[in-house]
Amino acid sequence: MLLNDGIPRAEDLAKVTPTDERLKKGPVVIVECFQEIPCDPCVKACKRGAITMPGGINDIPLVDFDLCNGCSLCISMCPGLAIFVVDKTWSEDRARVLIPYEYLPVPEVGQSVTGMDRAGKELGSFEVVKVNSGGKKNKTWTISIAVPQELAMEVRGINV
């Protein structure tokens, strides 16, 4: 149960996951935020208005997947590390997954990292394809890794 172990179940994820049709159109954000807490940096970070909280600051963020272009500006703004971007169009056999990261050392492009699922289970070794800083005041990095297409919706963390 999500409230007991922090791991979302299939029914939780179904509420926040874009359709397969949308995933085939290009990069898109997935906000795996399931608690109603006063927090809205993702809304403010989204220049396209794709992330909203219609019920106010305590609401769970909603994503308009048709407005989202997968720019990833929201990833490093989320204090809960609950935002990811998935690009299943990155290559024929691999998807690109953008993951928030707040540890040292920061991985480098070309490095192999261990990809993990939401429960911390290791899913394999994957190449880092891009590294973006959150900026001088934001110490959350966005790490892009290339994963097999079938793991794009499973890999949600890395171990360097």
Image (spheres, rainbow, N blue to C red):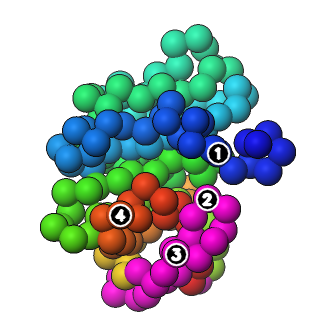
Spot occupied by residue 23 in the image (x, y as percentages of width and height)? 27, 45
Earlier-in-chain disc, 4 versus 2: 2
| Residue at the farthest right position | 4
Give the Cα distance between marks 4 and 2: 15 Å
SS of the residue at dot 1? loop
Q: Residues within 10 Å of mark 2 (few under 14, many from 20)?
A: some
Mark 2 and mark 3 residues within 8 Å of each other at the beta carbon:
no
Q: Amino acid at mark 2?
A: Arg
Viewer-proximal residue among 89 and 21? 21
- Label 2: state its secondary structure: loop
Q: Which residues are magenta?
A: 105-126
Which amino acid type is shown beneath numbered disc 3? Leu
Dot 4: what SS?
helix
Magenta region includes residue 106? yes
- The disc placed on residue 150 is 4
Say left or right for 14 vs 48: right
| Residue behind mark 3 | 123
Residue placed under numbered mark 2 in the picture: 118
CB within 8 Å, label 1 to label 2? yes
* Quarter of image, res 117: bottom right
As shown in the figure, which amino acid type bears the numbered disc 1? Pro
Residue sitting at x 68%, y 21%: 58
Screen quadrant of the N terminus: top right
For residue 37, say whether it is visible.
yes
Sequence order check: which comes first, mark 1 or mark 2?
1
Q: Which residue is mark 1?
A: 8
Q: Amino acid at mark 4?
A: Glu
Total marks in image: 4
Q: CA distance from mark 3 to mark 4?
A: 11 Å
Question: Which percent across, then down, holds residue 76?
Answer: 51, 52
**Distance from label 3 to label 1 (Cα)?**
17 Å
